Image (tube, grey):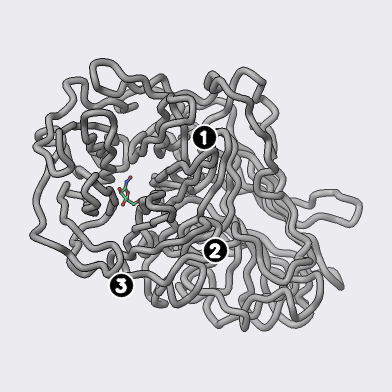
Amino acid sequence: MPSTSETGNTFNNPVIPGFHPDPSICRAGADYYLACSSFEYFPGVPVFHSRDLVHWTQIGNALDRPGQLRLPPGTPSSGGIYAPTLRHHDGRFWLIVTNVSGDGNLLLTATDPAGPWSDPVRLPGVHGIDPDLAWDDDGNCWCTYAGVGQVRIDPHTGETLGPPRRLWSGAPGAKAPEAPHLHQIGDYWYLLIAEGGTERGHAVSIARGRTPTGPFEPCPANPILTHRGTDHPIQNTGHADLVQAPDGSWWMVLLGVRPRGGTPGWHVLGRETFLVPVDWVDGWPVVGALSPVMPAPPWPLQRPAMTPGRDDFDQSELAPYWISPRHRSAQDCTTKEQPGRLTLRARGGSLDETDVTFVGRRQQHLSCRVRALVDTVEGQGGLAVRLDEQHHYDIEASSAEVRVHARVGALNAVEASRPAASGPVILRIDVTAVHTVKDARTGPDTIAIGVEEPDGTFVELTSLDGRYLSTEVAGGFTGRVIGMFASAGSVHFDWFDYEPLDD
Ligand code: 6LW
C-alpha cells in the first residue's frame, strides 16, 4: 500500500506508520533492519527489513514463541515489552529488550533477523529499561540503559562484569533521560539519548567521549531534535537511533506522533517511526528538518508491498502483523479448523478484560476502512477498534442481533443494535480523519460502525468521535489496533480487509 502522494523526489513520513515506537536500526551490507516495542501484545518486537530506509516490510517478530515472551494474564496494557536495541555484530544479529511485566532485560540472537530468534538470556544484573548493546575494539560488551547508566556484560550468559556506573543525565533538570544508544563514529563514542519524557516535551540529545565509558561532553546544540512548543504536524519527537548508509550518509530513525483535531490535538495511531537525514559539523550530528513529506535519499527507492490489506486466511500460520493481547494459542485462534477461515474461540473474557480472544493489526492510516465477513452460527463476536481494555469501540454479531458497544473509561454503553439477518454478515468500520488540524470543535476522526449489505451498501448503525480512542484520553504507550474477537463460542471469519483511505 504505497502512498499515492509520494513522488520520485520525495518520500512520506512516517516510514513505518501505526503503533511502531522506539525504533532501533542496524545495517548488514545492503540490508537495513529495524525493531520496535510491542508492550502487551503477542507476538512481540516486530522486525522490519528495508533496502532503501524508506520502504519497510515486516519480516517477523523476535519474540514469537510463548517460551520467549511471558506476559501473565494480568499484564497491564502498555506493560510488557519496552524498547529494543537491534545490532549486527560478529556475523550475528543481537537484540536486547525489557519485559517490564516479569522477566526484566532479555538478550536474543539470530543469524537471520526474520527468525528464528534464540531463547532469551536474562540479565538480572542490569537494572534499567531501554538497554543498548555496544562492543568496543577490545571485544568488551557495554550495556547502557535509561538513567543513563552502564555496565559491562557477557552477552552470552547475561552476567554483569563489574559494577554499574552512571554516565550522563542529559540537560540539567530535564526529566527521563532514557533510550540511550552508544555508537563509535570516527574518533568518538557518541551517546544518543531521549529526554523530556515521551509526550510533548520529548527531545533527542547527544554527548561524546573518547571511550565507551566516557567521560561524555554534551553537544552545545542540545537538544539536537525536538518539536516542543511548536505547531508542527509531527509532535513528541524522540527515542532515536542512528545508521550509516553504504554511501557514507547518516540517517536517524525516531518516534513521533501525528495529532489531529482541535486543542490539544489527539493522536490515535500511537507513536510511529520517522526517518530524517543527519549531517556532521565539527564532530557533532546536525539533524535535518523532519516533515511529513521529505526529499528522497539519493538512491533508487524500492517499492515493496507493504502490509497486505486483505487476508483470506488461506495460510496455515498467521502473517506476522497479526497481534493479540498477552497470549494466543492454536486452541483459541486457528486457520486449520476450517480451510480458508480464521476460527476464534472465546476464552471467556470480554474486550473489557485482560484475557480476551482478539486478533488484530495496527491501524496504520489516519483514514481507513475495515471489513470482515463473520459467521456467528456457533458463537458471538465481531470487529473492534482497541486502544486498551477501557477504551474500545466494537460491533458484535450473534445469531439474534448485531450490536455496537462503546467503552470509554468507566462508561460502557450499547450505542446501537439491529436484528441479525440469517447467515454470515459483513461488519464494517470506516475511520475518517478530520482535514483541518486546528478546528477547535473537532476530534481527530470519526469512527462509523455498521454492516455492509451484499450489494456493498454501508448501513451505518452509529458514528462515534475518535478522540476517546486516543493516547491523550487513554494514556499509555500503544496505539489503535483493529481486529476480530470472539466473546462466546466459536466465530469464523472468511476474510478481513483493511483499506487505507486518503485523508
Ligand atoms: C520507552 C522509553 C520511551 O522505554 O517510552 O519514548 C518507553 N520513549 O524510552 C516506552 O516506549
Q: CA distance from mark 2 to mark 3?
A: 34 Å
**Disc on the earlier residue, 2 or 3:** 3
Q: CA distance from mark 1 to mark 3?
A: 32 Å
Disc 1 marks a residue whose amino acid type is Pro
Mark 3 crowd level (few <14, some 14–19, many ≥20, 10 Å Cα) = some
Seen as rendered, the residue at the extreme right is: 455
Dot 2: what SS? strand
Location of residue 353 in the rendering, given as x and y in whole percent from the top left corner: 47, 73
Label annotation for residue 102: 3
Label 1 sits on residue: 14
Can see residue 395? no
Disc 2 marks a residue whose amino acid type is Ala
Asked if the residue at tag 3 contacts the one at tag 2, i.e. Cβ–Cβ closer than 8 Å, the answer is no
Q: CA distance from mark 2 to mark 1?
A: 35 Å
**Disc on the earlier residue, 1 or 3:** 1
Can see residue 359? yes
Q: Residue at x 39, y 46 (%)?
A: 22
Seen as rendered, the residue at the extreme front is: 138
Work out which quarter of the rendered image holds the N terminus and state it: top right
Location of residue 370 in the rendering, given as x and y in whole percent from the top left corner: 70, 52
Mark 2 crowd level (few <14, some 14–19, many ≥20, 10 Å Cα) = few
What is the quadrant of residue 76 in the picture? bottom left
Tag nearer the camera, 2 or 3: 3
Label 2 sits on residue: 413
Q: Residue at x 28, y 62 (%)?
A: 155
Q: Residue at x 65, y 49 (%)?
A: 307
